[in-house]
Image (cartoon, rainbow, N blue to C red):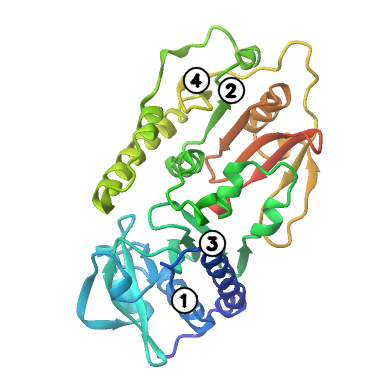
Amino acid sequence: MTIPAYPAARAVAPKVQAHFASHIETARAYGRDDLPDPPSEAAVEALIDAAFWASLRREEGVTPTISLAYVPPDRAGHPLSFSAPLPLRPAPLAKVAPAVERPGIHLGVWHRGGDFHVWGTTRDVPAFCLVVEVVASGLLVIKHRSDPFGKFVNVAVLEGDQVKVVDGAGGVAVPDCPQVVRSLLGFVEGLTAPDKVNVLVEVAASMRAHGRGGTLLVVPSDAAAWRESVVSPLLYELSPPFKGLTDLLKSKPKGFGQAIHHEWQEDLRRAVEAIAGLTAVDGATVINDRYEVLALGAKMTRRRGSAPVEQVSYTEPVEGDARTLVAPTQLGGTRHLSAAQFVHDQRDTTALVASQDGRFTIFRWSPCEEIVHAHRVDALLL
Protein backbone atom coordinates (compact mmCIF):
# COMPACT_ATOMS: atom_id res chain seq x y z
CA MET A 1 0.00 0.00 0.00
CA THR A 2 1.36 3.41 -0.94
CA ILE A 3 1.99 5.69 2.05
CA PRO A 4 1.04 9.35 1.55
CA ALA A 5 3.86 11.88 1.63
CA TYR A 6 4.45 13.88 4.80
CA PRO A 7 4.03 17.48 3.53
CA ALA A 8 6.36 19.00 6.12
CA ALA A 9 9.21 16.78 4.87
CA ARG A 10 9.13 18.27 1.39
CA ALA A 11 8.61 21.79 2.72
CA VAL A 12 11.60 21.75 5.06
CA ALA A 13 14.03 19.71 2.93
CA PRO A 14 15.47 22.67 0.94
CA LYS A 15 16.22 24.64 4.12
CA VAL A 16 17.83 21.65 5.80
CA GLN A 17 19.95 20.88 2.73
CA ALA A 18 21.06 24.52 2.56
CA HIS A 19 22.02 24.42 6.25
CA PHE A 20 24.29 21.41 5.78
CA ALA A 21 25.82 22.77 2.58
CA SER A 22 26.60 26.11 4.24
CA HIS A 23 28.08 24.65 7.44
CA ILE A 24 30.20 22.06 5.62
CA GLU A 25 31.53 24.72 3.25
CA THR A 26 32.41 26.98 6.18
CA ALA A 27 34.12 24.14 8.08
CA ARG A 28 36.16 23.22 5.02
CA ALA A 29 37.22 26.85 4.68
CA TYR A 30 38.64 26.53 8.21
CA GLY A 31 40.74 23.58 7.06
CA ARG A 32 38.52 20.64 8.08
CA ASP A 33 39.10 17.77 5.63
CA ASP A 34 37.17 15.03 7.46
CA LEU A 35 33.70 16.08 6.33
CA PRO A 36 31.08 14.33 4.17
CA ASP A 37 29.33 15.88 1.20
CA PRO A 38 26.05 17.57 2.18
CA PRO A 39 22.93 15.39 1.83
CA SER A 40 20.66 15.95 -1.15
CA GLU A 41 17.15 17.35 -0.75
CA ALA A 42 15.82 13.94 -1.77
CA ALA A 43 17.77 12.25 1.05
CA VAL A 44 16.56 14.77 3.63
CA GLU A 45 12.95 14.33 2.53
CA ALA A 46 13.19 10.53 2.45
CA LEU A 47 14.60 10.24 6.00
CA ILE A 48 12.08 12.69 7.48
CA ASP A 49 9.15 11.06 5.69
CA ALA A 50 10.08 7.53 6.80
CA ALA A 51 10.80 8.62 10.39
CA PHE A 52 7.48 10.49 10.68
CA TRP A 53 5.29 7.62 9.51
CA ALA A 54 7.27 5.14 11.60
CA SER A 55 6.68 7.33 14.68
CA LEU A 56 2.91 6.92 14.25
CA ARG A 57 3.10 3.12 14.35
CA ARG A 58 3.11 0.98 17.48
CA GLU A 59 5.15 -2.10 18.29
CA GLU A 60 3.58 -3.85 21.28
CA GLY A 61 1.98 -0.53 22.23
CA VAL A 62 5.28 1.41 22.19
CA THR A 63 6.21 4.33 19.94
CA PRO A 64 9.34 3.51 17.92
CA THR A 65 12.03 5.93 19.16
CA ILE A 66 14.63 5.60 16.44
CA SER A 67 17.47 7.70 15.09
CA LEU A 68 18.33 7.64 11.38
CA ALA A 69 21.84 8.66 10.30
CA TYR A 70 22.57 9.33 6.64
CA VAL A 71 26.00 7.75 6.36
CA PRO A 72 27.56 4.91 4.34
CA PRO A 73 28.96 1.92 6.27
CA ASP A 74 32.57 2.83 5.47
CA ARG A 75 32.20 6.25 7.14
CA ALA A 76 30.48 4.92 10.28
CA GLY A 77 32.36 3.92 13.39
CA HIS A 78 32.08 0.22 14.33
CA PRO A 79 29.16 -0.51 12.00
CA LEU A 80 26.84 -3.47 12.52
CA SER A 81 25.75 -4.38 9.00
CA PHE A 82 22.75 -6.44 7.90
CA SER A 83 23.46 -9.06 5.24
CA ALA A 84 20.30 -7.91 3.47
CA PRO A 85 19.60 -4.14 3.81
CA LEU A 86 16.12 -3.10 4.94
CA PRO A 87 13.93 -0.84 2.82
CA LEU A 88 13.52 2.66 4.25
CA ARG A 89 9.85 2.13 5.07
CA PRO A 90 7.81 2.72 8.27
CA ALA A 91 6.97 -0.95 8.94
CA PRO A 92 10.57 -2.29 8.88
CA LEU A 93 11.74 0.70 10.92
CA ALA A 94 9.11 0.04 13.57
CA LYS A 95 9.99 -3.67 13.67
CA VAL A 96 13.70 -3.07 14.30
CA ALA A 97 13.13 -0.13 16.69
CA PRO A 98 13.33 -2.13 19.96
CA ALA A 99 16.93 -3.07 19.13
CA VAL A 100 18.05 0.54 18.63
CA GLU A 101 16.01 2.54 21.12
CA ARG A 102 18.91 3.17 23.52
CA PRO A 103 20.56 6.60 23.27
CA GLY A 104 23.50 6.87 20.90
CA ILE A 105 22.50 4.07 18.51
CA HIS A 106 21.60 5.10 14.95
CA LEU A 107 20.14 3.19 12.05
CA GLY A 108 22.50 3.78 9.14
CA VAL A 109 20.80 4.89 5.91
CA TRP A 110 22.38 5.17 2.49
CA HIS A 111 21.31 5.17 -1.14
CA ARG A 112 21.60 2.66 -3.96
CA GLY A 113 20.65 4.28 -7.22
CA GLY A 114 17.45 6.21 -6.52
CA ASP A 115 16.41 4.09 -3.54
CA PHE A 116 17.30 4.50 0.12
CA HIS A 117 17.89 1.57 2.45
CA VAL A 118 18.89 0.81 6.05
CA TRP A 119 22.23 -1.01 5.97
CA GLY A 120 22.64 -1.58 9.74
CA THR A 121 23.45 0.33 12.93
CA THR A 122 26.24 2.49 14.29
CA ARG A 123 27.15 4.38 17.43
CA ASP A 124 29.62 6.75 15.81
CA VAL A 125 28.73 9.17 13.03
CA PRO A 126 31.03 11.70 11.36
CA ALA A 127 30.80 15.46 11.84
CA PHE A 128 27.95 17.11 9.92
CA CYS A 129 26.20 13.81 9.30
CA LEU A 130 22.44 14.26 8.81
CA VAL A 131 20.55 12.66 11.72
CA VAL A 132 16.75 12.46 12.00
CA GLU A 133 15.58 11.39 15.46
CA VAL A 134 12.09 10.32 16.57
CA VAL A 135 11.55 11.88 20.00
CA ALA A 136 7.86 10.96 20.36
CA SER A 137 4.88 10.16 18.18
CA GLY A 138 4.87 12.78 15.42
CA LEU A 139 7.81 14.67 16.96
CA LEU A 140 11.09 14.67 15.02
CA VAL A 141 14.39 16.48 15.41
CA ILE A 142 16.86 17.04 12.56
CA LYS A 143 20.40 17.46 13.88
CA HIS A 144 24.12 17.00 13.39
CA ARG A 145 27.37 17.22 15.31
CA SER A 146 30.03 19.79 14.53
CA ASP A 147 32.60 17.24 15.67
CA PRO A 148 32.45 13.46 16.24
CA PHE A 149 32.32 13.75 20.05
CA GLY A 150 30.32 16.89 20.87
CA LYS A 151 26.63 17.47 21.51
CA PHE A 152 24.28 17.37 18.58
CA VAL A 153 23.20 20.73 17.13
CA ASN A 154 19.52 20.93 16.18
CA VAL A 155 18.62 22.14 12.71
CA ALA A 156 14.83 21.83 12.82
CA VAL A 157 12.03 20.43 14.98
CA LEU A 158 8.90 18.99 13.36
CA GLU A 159 5.74 18.17 15.29
CA GLY A 160 2.86 17.20 13.07
CA ASP A 161 2.27 20.14 10.74
CA GLN A 162 4.29 22.53 12.92
CA VAL A 163 7.86 23.16 11.78
CA LYS A 164 10.48 25.12 13.72
CA VAL A 165 13.62 25.79 11.73
CA VAL A 166 16.47 26.96 13.91
CA ASP A 167 17.62 30.42 12.90
CA GLY A 168 21.30 30.31 13.82
CA ALA A 169 22.23 33.63 12.24
CA GLY A 170 19.24 35.41 13.78
CA GLY A 171 19.92 33.83 17.16
CA VAL A 172 23.49 35.02 17.41
CA ALA A 173 22.47 38.44 16.07
CA VAL A 174 20.70 39.03 19.38
CA PRO A 175 22.72 41.60 21.35
CA ASP A 176 25.02 40.00 23.94
CA CYS A 177 24.04 36.47 22.91
CA PRO A 178 25.52 34.19 25.63
CA GLN A 179 28.14 31.65 24.59
CA VAL A 180 25.95 28.77 25.79
CA VAL A 181 23.25 29.84 23.30
CA ARG A 182 25.84 30.31 20.55
CA SER A 183 27.08 26.78 21.20
CA LEU A 184 23.57 25.34 21.03
CA LEU A 185 23.15 27.09 17.69
CA GLY A 186 26.35 25.53 16.40
CA PHE A 187 28.44 28.72 16.55
CA VAL A 188 30.99 27.15 18.86
CA GLU A 189 34.66 27.46 18.02
CA GLY A 190 34.49 23.77 17.08
CA LEU A 191 35.05 24.67 13.43
CA THR A 192 38.64 25.43 14.30
CA ALA A 193 38.91 23.52 17.60
CA PRO A 194 36.83 20.33 17.27
CA ASP A 195 37.59 19.20 20.83
CA LYS A 196 35.93 22.26 22.40
CA VAL A 197 33.42 21.37 25.12
CA ASN A 198 30.70 23.72 26.37
CA VAL A 199 29.80 22.32 29.76
CA LEU A 200 26.67 24.43 30.21
CA VAL A 201 25.25 22.99 26.99
CA GLU A 202 25.72 19.47 28.36
CA VAL A 203 24.23 20.42 31.73
CA ALA A 204 21.25 22.14 30.10
CA ALA A 205 20.46 19.06 28.01
CA SER A 206 20.68 16.84 31.09
CA MET A 207 18.53 19.21 33.16
CA ARG A 208 15.81 19.11 30.55
CA ALA A 209 16.07 15.34 30.26
CA HIS A 210 15.37 14.57 33.94
CA GLY A 211 11.91 16.12 33.54
CA ARG A 212 11.51 17.45 37.08
CA GLY A 213 12.23 21.08 36.30
CA GLY A 214 14.96 23.03 38.03
CA THR A 215 17.19 26.09 38.17
CA LEU A 216 20.95 26.39 37.79
CA LEU A 217 22.66 29.65 38.76
CA VAL A 218 26.15 30.36 37.38
CA VAL A 219 27.95 32.96 39.50
CA PRO A 220 31.43 34.54 39.38
CA SER A 221 34.18 32.66 41.19
CA ASP A 222 35.86 35.89 42.29
CA ALA A 223 32.85 37.61 43.94
CA ALA A 224 30.25 36.83 46.58
CA ALA A 225 27.61 39.49 45.81
CA TRP A 226 25.25 36.76 44.59
CA ARG A 227 24.68 35.79 48.23
CA GLU A 228 22.67 39.01 48.63
CA SER A 229 20.02 37.49 46.35
CA VAL A 230 19.53 34.16 48.14
CA VAL A 231 17.98 33.40 51.51
CA SER A 232 20.63 32.94 54.19
CA PRO A 233 21.74 30.61 55.63
CA LEU A 234 21.91 28.29 52.65
CA LEU A 235 20.35 25.01 53.70
CA TYR A 236 22.51 22.84 51.43
CA GLU A 237 25.74 24.78 51.04
CA LEU A 238 28.76 22.64 50.21
CA SER A 239 32.01 23.00 52.12
CA PRO A 240 34.40 22.72 50.42
CA PRO A 241 32.80 23.29 47.00
CA PHE A 242 32.51 20.13 44.91
CA LYS A 243 35.20 20.21 42.20
CA GLY A 244 34.61 16.89 40.44
CA LEU A 245 33.65 18.44 37.10
CA THR A 246 36.36 21.11 37.39
CA ASP A 247 39.07 18.50 37.90
CA LEU A 248 37.72 16.35 35.06
CA LEU A 249 37.89 19.24 32.61
CA LYS A 250 41.51 19.87 33.57
CA SER A 251 42.33 16.25 32.78
CA LYS A 252 40.85 16.29 29.26
CA PRO A 253 43.01 14.01 27.09
CA LYS A 254 44.80 15.32 24.02
CA GLY A 255 46.07 13.05 21.31
CA PHE A 256 45.49 9.76 23.14
CA GLY A 257 43.25 8.16 20.56
CA GLN A 258 39.55 7.61 20.19
CA ALA A 259 39.19 4.99 22.93
CA ILE A 260 40.70 7.27 25.60
CA HIS A 261 38.56 10.16 24.40
CA HIS A 262 35.41 8.03 24.61
CA GLU A 263 36.33 7.01 28.16
CA TRP A 264 36.79 10.66 29.12
CA GLN A 265 33.48 11.56 27.43
CA GLU A 266 31.72 8.92 29.52
CA ASP A 267 33.27 10.33 32.69
CA LEU A 268 32.13 13.80 31.61
CA ARG A 269 28.60 12.54 30.97
CA ARG A 270 28.37 11.05 34.46
CA ALA A 271 29.74 14.23 36.07
CA VAL A 272 27.28 16.40 34.12
CA GLU A 273 24.35 14.15 35.02
CA ALA A 274 25.32 14.32 38.69
CA ILE A 275 25.21 18.14 38.66
CA ALA A 276 22.05 18.27 36.55
CA GLY A 277 20.41 15.86 38.99
CA LEU A 278 20.99 18.31 41.84
CA THR A 279 18.73 20.83 40.10
CA ALA A 280 15.73 18.56 40.73
CA VAL A 281 15.90 19.59 44.40
CA ASP A 282 13.47 22.40 45.24
CA GLY A 283 15.33 25.69 44.94
CA ALA A 284 18.35 26.54 42.79
CA THR A 285 21.68 24.79 42.37
CA VAL A 286 24.59 27.26 42.43
CA ILE A 287 27.86 26.74 40.58
CA ASN A 288 30.62 29.19 39.79
CA ASP A 289 32.28 29.92 36.45
CA ARG A 290 34.90 27.23 37.20
CA TYR A 291 32.03 24.69 37.46
CA GLU A 292 32.53 24.16 41.18
CA VAL A 293 29.24 23.30 42.92
CA LEU A 294 28.62 25.74 45.78
CA ALA A 295 25.09 24.94 46.96
CA LEU A 296 21.80 23.31 46.09
CA GLY A 297 18.23 24.03 47.14
CA ALA A 298 19.01 27.78 47.35
CA LYS A 299 15.97 30.04 47.72
CA MET A 300 16.24 33.15 45.56
CA THR A 301 15.01 36.50 46.83
CA ARG A 302 14.98 40.11 45.64
CA ARG A 303 18.11 41.95 46.75
CA ARG A 304 17.46 44.57 49.39
CA GLY A 305 16.80 47.96 47.76
CA SER A 306 16.36 46.49 44.28
CA ALA A 307 13.27 47.17 42.17
CA PRO A 308 11.14 44.21 41.09
CA VAL A 309 11.73 43.10 37.52
CA GLU A 310 8.65 43.90 35.45
CA GLN A 311 9.72 43.05 31.90
CA VAL A 312 12.29 40.92 30.14
CA SER A 313 13.37 40.80 26.51
CA TYR A 314 12.28 37.44 25.07
CA THR A 315 13.50 35.60 21.97
CA GLU A 316 13.45 32.08 20.55
CA PRO A 317 16.07 31.34 17.86
CA VAL A 318 13.70 29.96 15.24
CA GLU A 319 12.65 31.37 11.89
CA GLY A 320 9.75 33.81 12.13
CA ASP A 321 10.37 34.70 15.77
CA ALA A 322 10.74 38.34 16.80
CA ARG A 323 12.06 39.91 19.99
CA THR A 324 9.26 40.87 22.38
CA LEU A 325 9.00 42.46 25.82
CA VAL A 326 7.06 40.28 28.26
CA ALA A 327 6.45 40.00 31.98
CA PRO A 328 8.50 37.16 33.54
CA THR A 329 5.27 35.52 34.70
CA GLN A 330 4.31 35.01 31.04
CA LEU A 331 7.27 32.67 30.65
CA GLY A 332 6.36 30.35 33.49
CA GLY A 333 5.83 30.25 37.24
CA THR A 334 7.90 31.07 40.30
CA ARG A 335 11.12 29.61 38.89
CA HIS A 336 11.11 32.00 35.92
CA LEU A 337 10.19 35.06 37.97
CA SER A 338 12.84 34.30 40.60
CA ALA A 339 15.52 33.64 37.96
CA ALA A 340 14.72 36.88 36.11
CA GLN A 341 14.90 38.83 39.37
CA PHE A 342 18.18 37.16 40.34
CA VAL A 343 19.84 38.06 37.03
CA HIS A 344 18.37 41.58 37.21
CA ASP A 345 19.99 42.08 40.62
CA GLN A 346 23.22 40.14 39.91
CA ARG A 347 24.14 41.20 36.38
CA ASP A 348 27.29 39.11 36.07
CA THR A 349 25.38 35.83 36.52
CA THR A 350 23.44 33.42 34.31
CA ALA A 351 20.30 31.46 35.21
CA LEU A 352 19.22 28.29 33.41
CA VAL A 353 15.60 27.28 34.05
CA ALA A 354 13.99 23.98 33.02
CA SER A 355 10.22 23.53 33.23
CA GLN A 356 8.54 20.20 33.83
CA ASP A 357 6.76 20.55 30.47
CA GLY A 358 10.09 20.64 28.63
CA ARG A 359 10.50 24.39 28.12
CA PHE A 360 14.00 25.68 28.78
CA THR A 361 14.98 29.33 29.26
CA ILE A 362 18.36 30.96 29.77
CA PHE A 363 18.33 34.33 31.56
CA ARG A 364 21.21 36.74 31.09
CA TRP A 365 21.60 40.50 31.60
CA SER A 366 22.04 42.36 28.30
CA PRO A 367 24.23 45.49 28.68
CA CYS A 368 23.28 46.53 25.14
CA GLU A 369 19.55 46.46 25.87
CA GLU A 370 19.86 47.30 29.57
CA ILE A 371 17.38 44.56 30.40
CA VAL A 372 17.24 40.89 31.38
CA HIS A 373 17.15 38.79 28.21
CA ALA A 374 15.27 35.47 28.25
CA HIS A 375 16.53 33.06 25.57
CA ARG A 376 14.07 30.18 25.06
CA VAL A 377 16.15 27.24 23.80
CA ASP A 378 14.12 24.03 24.24
CA ALA A 379 13.97 23.61 20.45
CA LEU A 380 17.77 23.35 20.60
CA LEU A 381 17.87 20.76 23.39
CA LEU A 382 15.56 18.01 22.11
Residue drawn where x is 68% and y is 51% of the image: 172
User: Seen from this angle, which residue lies furthest front?
Assistant: 31
Q: Earlier in the sequence, mark 4 or mark 3?
A: 3
**Which image quadrant for residue 209?**
top left
Q: Which mark's residue is nearer the viewer, 2 or 4? A: 2
> Helix, strand, or loop for circle 1?
loop
For residue 14, say whether it is visible: yes
Pick whichever of labels 1 and 4 is earlier in the sequence.
1
Q: Residues within 10 Å of mark 3 (few under 14, many from 20)?
A: few
Who's the residue at 60% across and 32% down the image?
A: 351
Q: CA distance from mark 1 to mark 4?
A: 48 Å
User: Residue flagged by tag 3: what amino acid is it?
Assistant: Tyr
Q: CA distance from mark 2 to mark 3?
A: 33 Å
Q: Quadrant of residue 11?
A: bottom right
Q: CA distance from mark 1 to mark 2?
A: 43 Å
Who comes first in sequence, dot 1 or dot 2?
1
Circle nearer the N terminus (2, 4): 2
Q: Could you say whether the residue bearing mark 3 is in a helix, strand or loop?
A: loop
Which amino acid lies under the numbered mark 1 shown in the image of this protein? Asp
Category of crowding for the residue at label 1, using alpha-carbon neighbours closer than 10 angstroms: few (below 14), some (14–19), many (at least 20): few
Distance from label 4 to label 3 (Cα)? 44 Å
Q: Nearer the viewer, residue 354 or 44?
A: 44
Q: Are marks 4 and 3 in contact (CB under 8 Å)?
A: no
Name above or below for residue 377 compared with residue 298: below
Element type where label 2 sits in the image: loop
Do tag 2 and tag 4 residues touch (Cβ < 8 Å)? no
| Residue corresponding to mark 3 | 30
Disc 4 residue type?
A: Gly
Q: Which mark is residue 220?
A: 2
The residue singled out by tag 4 in the image is 297
Q: Which mark is residue 37?
A: 1
